[in-house]
């Protein structure tokens, strides 16, 4: 057996390489990563390091402790994402002493950082790192997880100060919001077959999920019937009330804009959208809710 110091240095090296690799993948693919990319992983000193496996708690062969934990979205308000600055992560099975659960407990005791993968749609994950296991709750068969800043997470033997606590809570709440937003975006883009509902532009990097009723309002739920897939131009135009969408899913462009004279971008981007019919999801239950459309359309009329 190797001395403990060797293992710690090796473990630290693999995790640092995994975090750096993830950062590069996010630069390349955007924040939501395909499962194939995570499953293929990267090469570290001649060995392959995948980031996911068949189970939620994943330990690559060359490490002694788990490297990632994965969870999948179900429902618009996922209660596994707690509100008080920690995320809950369920044990594997009901046995607290299953080796995967023991592995996470050791990560907690040794303050070893992990990657948290949140499945926002089939085969697509939002990665958050580093995360730490900060609590073990056998009564509910869950661990408590917190997000930290990659630059400030400190060494494994670093004592967690009150300042660290505050920072982690803040970053965990921000991460939770990001997970919800990414989930909503994915579900909306899939429902609209990855095209803008107004102009049919099909370019994932330029598409966004717009709320019909904004999320600051009581009915602004992150659900597909309150969403529209829009390109950046039409999303901004919709939010700024330059275009409106009637409850029968027909687009209207503000009068002043129809009368303006400018280059081709104005003509093709905005003026031609007037009285266009939205490109809608195939499934009736994913189509925009007419009452929410009516609420928003009244605001558009009010702004004219
Ligand atoms: Zn568009």
Image (cartoon, rainbow, N blue to C red):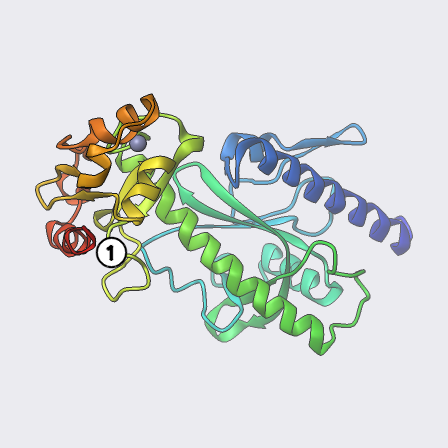
Q: Nearer the viewer, residue 73 or 295?
A: 295
Residue 100 located left or right of residue 82: right
The residue under the point 11% across, 49% down is 290
Q: Nearer the viewer, residue 3 or 72?
A: 72
The residue under the point 78% across, 72% down is 159
Q: Name the residue at the top extreme.
A: 264
Q: Answer yes or no: is residue 91 visible.
A: no
Q: Name the residue at the left extreme.
A: 248
- Residue 25, percent from left and from top: 61, 34
- Residue 148, percent from left and from top: 65, 60
Disc 1 target residue: 213
Q: Ligand 1 is found in which quarter of the picture?
A: top left
Q: Residues within 10 Å of mark 1 (few under 14, many from 20)?
A: many
Residue 148's place in the image compared with 239, above or below, is below
Q: Nearer the viewer, residue 53 or 248?
A: 248
Q: Answer yes or no: is residue 53 visible.
A: yes
């Amino acid at each position: 057996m190797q001395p403990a110091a060797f293992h710690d240095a090796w473990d630290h090296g693999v995790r640092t390489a995994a975090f750096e690799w993830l950062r590069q993948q996010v630069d390349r693919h955007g924040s939501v990563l395909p499962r194939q990319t995570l499953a293929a992983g990267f090469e570290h000193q001649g060995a392959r390091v995948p980031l996911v496996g068949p189970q939620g708690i994943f330990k690559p062969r060359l490490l002694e402790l788990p490297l990632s934990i994965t969870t999948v979205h179900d429902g618009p308000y996922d209660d596994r994402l707690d509100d008080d600055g920690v995320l809950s992560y369920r044990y594997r099975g009901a046995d607290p002493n299953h080796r995967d659960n023991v592995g996470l407990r050791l990560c907690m005791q040794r303050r070893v950082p992990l990657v948290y993968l949140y499945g926002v749609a089939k085969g697509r994950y939002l990665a958050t790192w580093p995360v730490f296991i900060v609590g073990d709750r056998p009564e509910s068969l869950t661990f408590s997880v917190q997000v930290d800043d990659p630059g400030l997470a400190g060494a494994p033997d670093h004592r967690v100060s009150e300042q660290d606590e505050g920072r982690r809570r803040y970053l965990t709440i921000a991460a939770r919001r990001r997970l919800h937003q990414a989930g909503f975006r994915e579900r909306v883009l899939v429902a609209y077959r990855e095209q803008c509902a107004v102009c049919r532009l099909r370019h994932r990097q330029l598409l966004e999920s717009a709320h019909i009723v904004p999320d600051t309002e009581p009915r602004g739920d992150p659900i597909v019937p309150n969403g529209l897939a829009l390109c950046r131009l039409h999303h901004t135009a919709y939010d700024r009330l330059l275009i409106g969408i009637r409850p029968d899913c027909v687009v209207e462009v503000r009068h002043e804009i129809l009368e303006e004279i400018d280059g081709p971008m104005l003509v093709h981007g905005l003026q031609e959208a007037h009285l266009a019919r939205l490109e809608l999801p195939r499934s009736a239950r994913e189509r925009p809710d007419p009452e929410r459309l009516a609420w928003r359309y009244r605001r558009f009329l009010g702004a004219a």
